[in-house]
Amino acid sequence: MIKKIRVAIIGGGYTGLAAAVKLSDLGMRVTIFESGKSSGGLARSFLGSFWKWPLEIFYHHIFTGDREILSMAKKVGAKVLILEPKTNSFINNQEMQLDSPLSVIKFRAISLLSRFRMGLGLLILKTIPNGLFLEKFTVSKLLPILIGRESYRVIWEKLMSSKFGPWKDEVNMAWFW
């Protein structure tokens, strides 16, 4: 009789869980050791008592186009909750929706020409199948060229400053992509 190989995985984040599924598929006996209260690592979320949907813990989330993650969830029988919440930006002391082509066209904080240019630039980024080459460029240098200086100044530069502070000019375009 052949004994199954036993494997210990330290960490129940997405990588540890994916490795456990793959090794299990290969016939190995897998045990996951997780120090947290639940598995999922940086991809976990939590739900406040008065919220309608969960909030991701570390800004990691699943997009509808993340085929590998959705396929893995289906394989292991995990429930996937994909909602369509509004994404707003706080500009000129008011919340403005900015999460779809239509909301970009309606976004009156920048000129109509800038809205079309930003929409075109974001569409170009969305059609790139592999953005690894974008690591050579910084967001602060390439994005204003791609979407226009007004759009960058009014929307993205403020968001980059808020998220990255003094390091905003070091963030590469692959992150933004």
Image (spheres, rainbow, N blue to C red):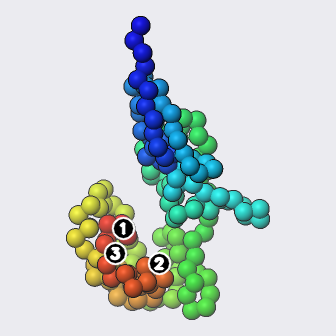
Name the residue at 27% across, 61% down. 132
Q: Are marks 1 and 3 in contact (CB under 8 Å)?
A: yes
Residue where numbered disc 1 is placed: 175
Residue where numbered disc 2 is placed: 163
Cα–Cα gap, marks 3 and 2: 11 Å
- Report the disc number at residue 128: none
Secondary element at tag 3: loop
Amino acid type, mark 1: Trp
Query: Label 2: how many residues lie within 10 Å, few (<14), some (14-19) or many (20+)?
Result: few
Q: Please tell me which residue lies in front, 91 or 158.
A: 158
Q: Write down the quadrant of residue 24 in the picture.
A: top left
Query: Label 3: how many residues lie within 10 Å, few (<14), some (14-19) or many (20+)?
Result: some
Secondary element at tag 1: helix
Q: Please tell me which residue lies in front, 44 or 111.
A: 44
Give the mark nearest the N terminus, 2 or 1.
Answer: 2
Secondary element at tag 2: helix
Residue where numbered disc 3 is placed: 171
Q: Residue farthest to the right?
A: 50
Q: Is residue 24 visible?
A: no
Amino acid type, mark 2: Lys
> Dividing the image into 4 quarters, which one contains the C terminus?
bottom left
Amino acid type, mark 3: Val
Instruction: Locate residue 120 relative to residue 76 in the image: left or right.
Output: left
Q: Position of residue 81 (x, y in %)?
A: 61, 50
Q: Is residue 148 above or below residue 133?
A: below
Q: Position of residue 28 (x, y in %)?
A: 43, 25
Q: Residue farthest to the top?
A: 1
